[in-house]
Image (cartoon, rainbow, N blue to C red):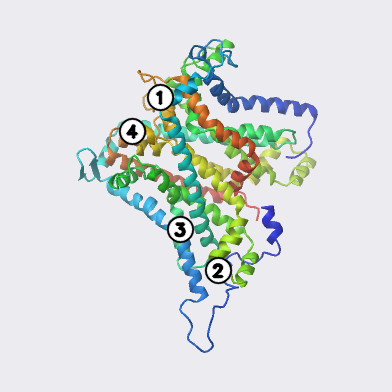
């Protein structure tokens, strides 16, 4: 942003809506009636034209499918027979009767909670470590961040390879005399594996956000705390955490919503198994709709997913008020 | 916490950082080295951290088993089109929402913003049915149109809008006094100034498209149309077991180019993404 600052950084107190103050007066004949296409109208038209692609896209690929998903949840579609039949609340009845659903929701919840805790804790730890005055911290930052750019399925495949019964992890454990479990086949270890693989893949993003936030904490606060004799731990909880709380909230929202969308890792590592222990909602939705061709039921599960995302977003927005520290 | 620390603390810090690095670096290392090993050495015990008998057979097999070069091209051209398309759509609408005043602006912005709330997984069933009816299943159209115009580009629009709002208005006003039209002002003044935001949007859009997995396996069925993530999981033997060295060779070829670009341009990468996060 330095470029912007030097070019136009002077006195920018004026609200950024722009345009209104400096409209070029169009060709206007004296005493004549005003032409229809005034600068103001032209400007409005440009505004509409600029947003047209995005607006059409949102209508066709976001709003319309969202309405259709409700409509489809009341129908059953058979691709092969070409039939599309109204079934009323049958899919919702199926939802209530689905013996897999409690397991699926449990797996979804466990995955999200485990992921958020591990991810935010590790991200914060790495950011605090990298924020010390150390040579070569850029190198470490690069290394921690690098899995973010490794393609997701490639990353997951390697971990699948490492986590096999006779894979690299157990090989390494064996050399120190530990007999490792078959990670991806045990109920607890499978869930743990999926979470760990996902955390190492993406924690770099949250780390970078935390690092940026930490660098915005004024050093004088720590100096003052030091004079008062506050320990490092106390400084961390009383100064650092409150000051970076907006970033903690932001990263937790991103991470929770992201955790609900996880799919490739499950599909590649565990296929939802063993049992339904790693069948998260999106994977179950995929299985029902696209493997078993229960499109109506898939649509119903989509609504469940949407309801959860909506509830969580509202909840987090509410939490903002009491949780986030405001400077002003 | 930028305070001076003692040498001993420094040594401890370096030690901790080095240990913490292992799970981030080792998988990629293991992927590349294992892809160079003959299949018998892949599960050797104790594990070989360095391949003793380097072979490139697996890399050759990748291209024999699947039209891998075609799949590579698919992923690359789709990601590039999606990136350019998203930049165009999000810069235009982000600019309009930030800088131009028109009636219904706030309501329309809320309509667009709704896309942020709706994960694309929620709409995958109706989208599949829409594209099925249009005869566009097993083509690349769903993978191009939906990301450019649908929910994924909403975040891009939001970032661009935030950026344009923070841009000081004087330059643009001067340009308009000089008689430049709205589009010329946008194109010649605002857009060049928004390079940091455009860069960040380009990076995350490219990565997002390059990593897409659910959408390709839902929409595509013939191997010559596959994208890379989908193709990677197809290297299995007659019994459905993965051919590990071939799979790892293909995975290496998918991961290493992006990783190389990242190492060269890591400053822009990291700071660009941090920037978007803070703006959001």
Classify A212 as above or below A102. Answer: below
Would you say A74 lies left or right of B242 here? left
Give the percent coordinates (x, y) of residue B237: 38, 19
Is A89 in front, or is B251?
B251
Quadrant position of residue A175 = top right
Secondary structure at badge 2 equals loop
The answer to whether marks 2 and 3 mark residues whose Cβ atoms lie closer than 8 Å is no
- Residue B3, horizontal then vertical, whole percent: 77, 38
Q: Are marks 1 and 4 on the same chain?
A: no
Q: What residue is shown with label 1?
A: B65
A99 horizontally vs B243: left or right? left
Q: Give the mark, 2 or 1, whose residue is nearer the N terminus.
A: 1
What element does badge 1 sit on?
A: helix
Q: Nearer the viewer, residue A224 or A71?
A: A71
How far apart, in angstroms, are the residues tagged by discs 3 and 1? 48 Å
For marks 3 and 1, the one nearer the N-term is 1
At which x and y percent is residue A247?
60, 45
Which label sits in the foreground, 2 or 3?
A: 2
Which mark, by number, is residue A43? none
Q: Is residue A83 left or right of residue B106?
A: left
Q: Is residue A216 above or below residue B25?
A: below
Q: In the rendered image, which residue does mark 4 sit on?
A: A287
Residue that appears at 36% across and 41% down: B139
Closer to the camera: disc 3 or disc 1? Answer: 1
Q: Nearer the viewer, residue A168 or B195?
A: B195
| Residue located beneath label 2 in the image | B181
| Subunit under mark 3 | B
Q: CA distance from mark 2 to mark 4?
A: 53 Å
Label 2 and label 4 in one chain = no
The residue positioned 54% from the left and 57% from the top of the image is B161
Give the residue at mark 3: B110
Could you tell me how far apart the alpha carbons at marks 2 and 3 are, in whole angstroms? 27 Å
């Amino acid at each position: 942003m330095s470029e912007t600052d030097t070019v136009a950084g002077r006195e920018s107190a004026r609200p950024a809506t722009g345009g209104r103050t400096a409209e070029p007066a169009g060709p206007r004949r004296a005493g004549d009636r005003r032409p229809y296409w005034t600068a103001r109208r032209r400007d409005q038209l440009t505004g509409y034209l600029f947003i047209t692609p995005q607006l059409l896209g949102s209508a066709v690929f976001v709003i319309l499918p969202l309405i259709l998903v409700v409509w489809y949840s009341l129908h059953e579609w058979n691709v092969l027979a070409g039939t599309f039949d109204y079934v009323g609340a049958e899919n919702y009845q199926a939802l209530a009767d689905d013996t897999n659903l409690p397991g699926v929701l449990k797996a979804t919840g466990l995955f999200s909670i485990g992921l958020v805790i591990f991810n935010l804790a590790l991200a914060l730890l790495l950011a605090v470590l990298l924020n010390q005055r150390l040579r070569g911290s850029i190198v470490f930052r690069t290394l921690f961040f690098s899995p973010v750019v490794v393609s997701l399925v490639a990353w997951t495949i390697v971990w699948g390879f490492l986590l096999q019964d006779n894979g690299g992890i157990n090989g390494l454990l064996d050399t120190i005399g530990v007999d490792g479990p078959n990670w991806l086949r045990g109920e607890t270890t499978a869930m743990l594996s999926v979470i760990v693989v996902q955390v190492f893949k993406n924690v770099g993003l949250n780390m970078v956000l935390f690092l940026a936030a930490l660098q915005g904490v004024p050093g004088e606060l720590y100096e003052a705390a030091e004079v008062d004799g506050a320990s490092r731990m106390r400084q961390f909880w009383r100064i650092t955490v409150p000051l970076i709380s907006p970033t903690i909230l932001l990263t937790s929202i991103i991470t929770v919503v992201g955790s609900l969308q996880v799919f490739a890792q499950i599909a590649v590592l565990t296929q939802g198994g063993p049992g339904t222990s790693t069948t998260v909602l999106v994977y179950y939705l995929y299985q029902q709709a696209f493997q078993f061709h229960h499109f109506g039921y898939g649509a119903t599960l989509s609504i469940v997913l949407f309801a959860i995302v909506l509830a969580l977003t509202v909840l987090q927005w509410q939490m903002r008020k009491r949780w986030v520290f405001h400077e002003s | 916490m930028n305070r001076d620390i003692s040498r001993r603390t420094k040594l401890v810090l370096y030690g901790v950082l080095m240990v913490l690095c292992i799970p981030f670096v080792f998988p990629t290392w293991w992927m590349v080295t294992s892809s160079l090993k003959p299949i018998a050495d892949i599960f050797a015990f104790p594990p070989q951290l360095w391949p003793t008998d380097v072979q490139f057979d697996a890399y050759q097999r990748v291209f024999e088993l699947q039209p891998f070069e075609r799949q590579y091209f698919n992923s690359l051209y789709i990601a590039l089109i999606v990136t350019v398309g998203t930049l165009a759509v999000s810069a235009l609408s982000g600019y309009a929402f930030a800088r131009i005043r028109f009636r219904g602006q706030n309501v329309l912005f809320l309509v667009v913003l709704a896309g942020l709330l709706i994960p694309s997984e929620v709409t995958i069933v109706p989208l599949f049915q829409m594209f099925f009816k249009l005869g566009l299943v097993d083509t690349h159209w769903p993978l191009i149109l939906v990301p450019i115009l649908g929910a994924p580009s909403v975040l891009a629009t939001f970032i661009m809008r935030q950026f344009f709002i923070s841009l000081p208005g004087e330059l643009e006003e001067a340009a308009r006094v000089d008689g430049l039209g709205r589009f010329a002002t946008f194109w010649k003044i605002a857009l060049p100034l928004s390079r940091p935001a455009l860069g960040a949007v380009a990076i995350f859009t490219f990565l997002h498209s390059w990593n897409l997995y659910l959408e390709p396996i839902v929409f595509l069925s013939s191997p010559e149309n596959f994208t890379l993530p989908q193709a990677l999981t197809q290297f299995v033997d007659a019994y459905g077991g993965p051919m590990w060295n071939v799979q790892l060779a293909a995975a290496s070829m998918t991961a290493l180019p992006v990783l190389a670009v990242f190492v060269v341009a890591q400053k822009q990468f990291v700071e660009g993404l941090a920037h978007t996060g803070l703006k959001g």
